[in-house]
Amino acid sequence: MAGGSKIAIYGAIGANLLIAAGKFLAAFFTGSSAMLAEGIHSFVDTGNGFLLLMGIKRSKQEPDALHPFGYGKEVYFWSFVVSILVFALGGGFALYEGFHALQDPKVIEDPTWNYIVLIAAMIFEGTALYFALKVFNKSRVKSGNLITSIIQSKDAATFAVIIEDTAAVVGLSIALIGIFLSQQLNNPYMDGGASMLIGVLLLTVATFLARESKDLLLGESANPDVLASINKIMSDNINVKDWGLPHTMHFGPENILLVIEIDLLGNLELSQAEKMMENLRAEIKLQQPKITQIYIQTTNKIKSEKPNY
């Protein structure tokens, strides 16, 4: 899914670059606080896209002595950094700008530029969100709603884009309503209030993204359906008498580590046990290709084929 993630991120970067430029121009000509907050939001989202791309690239590095399990968690780290930037720069600046606008309120005399930019931005952001969802739906958990699927997803780069794009569409709607009410009601506080609401929205979104990225960064287990598949493989093997809880950890969206203890039948020779465990590894990888590293440990002693004299 890395290639799909990149497509979603490239789409988001392109849309955010165009939108940020338009928002800053509109904010310059109209003096709208909400438009300036939205411009900063799009500019931050553009930078976040490049950070996610860097995370994907660095996660593809080969394992080495310092990182024997690879660099897959790089993408989780940079997703966490993105959440901090959304919180501090996006949400923080929007709140600051909104507070400043409420202290010195000004009615927007001609909001035409704002309307044009906001409507165009909603089209661009909506298109980017559509493509991100299309990529995400190829690997998402089919049961449950979108929020549940994001919580269970291990593809941090893609769901970060979805969260950001969704926040962008909602933020644009808030800005549009705030500017419209400010002009129609001749109430300058509506514009500043819209900026404050955008700030609260971004702080909420950033907190959610940080929580999801943190769980993956600390080492989140595989989804229940993967664990159920492993347990079924063990139960179907006539040579496995018992087994422990499968210990799994994601080192990336497509890279799962599995460690499991098994209790074999007592009459197996060493060569038979080795062959059986090799077959188990092959079957697990066949049914769950995302499990790339498998460590099977036996809890019982295996009979040696060499006679004792």
Image (cartoon, helix red, strand yellow):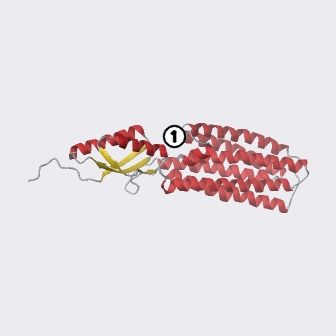
Q: In this view, does 281 lie above or below 249?
A: above
Q: Position of residue 247 (x, y in %)?
A: 41, 52
| Position of residue 77 measured from the top left corner of the image (x, y, whole percent) | 53, 55
Instruction: Tally the numbered discs.
Output: 1
Going by the image, does 82 lie left or right of 57? Answer: right
**93 or 198: nearer the viewer:** 198
Q: Which residue is drawn at 77% across and 43% down?
A: 118
Amino acid carrying label 1: it is Met
Q: In this view, does 209 lie to the left or right of 293?
A: right
In the rendering, at what x and y percent does residue 137 appear? Answer: 58, 38
Tell me the residue at 77%/57% (across/down).
Answer: 196
Taking the image as drawn, is residue 62 in sight?
A: no
Which residue position is annotated with label 1?
1
Residue 3 placed where, x, y %? 52, 39
In this rendered view, identify the residue nearer to me: 146 or 300. 300
195 lies above or below 173: below
Please identify the quarter of the rendering in which residue 169 is found: top right
Residue 234 in view, yes or no: yes
Q: How crowded is mark 1: few (under 14 residues within 10 Å), some or many (20 or more)?
A: some
Report whether 196 appears left or right of 89: right
Can you name the residue that lies furthest to the bottom here?
Answer: 103
Which of 83/228 is in front? 228
Instruction: Name the residue at the left extreme.
Output: 309
Question: What residue do we see at 54% from left, 41% from top?
Answer: 141
SS class of the residue under badge 1? loop
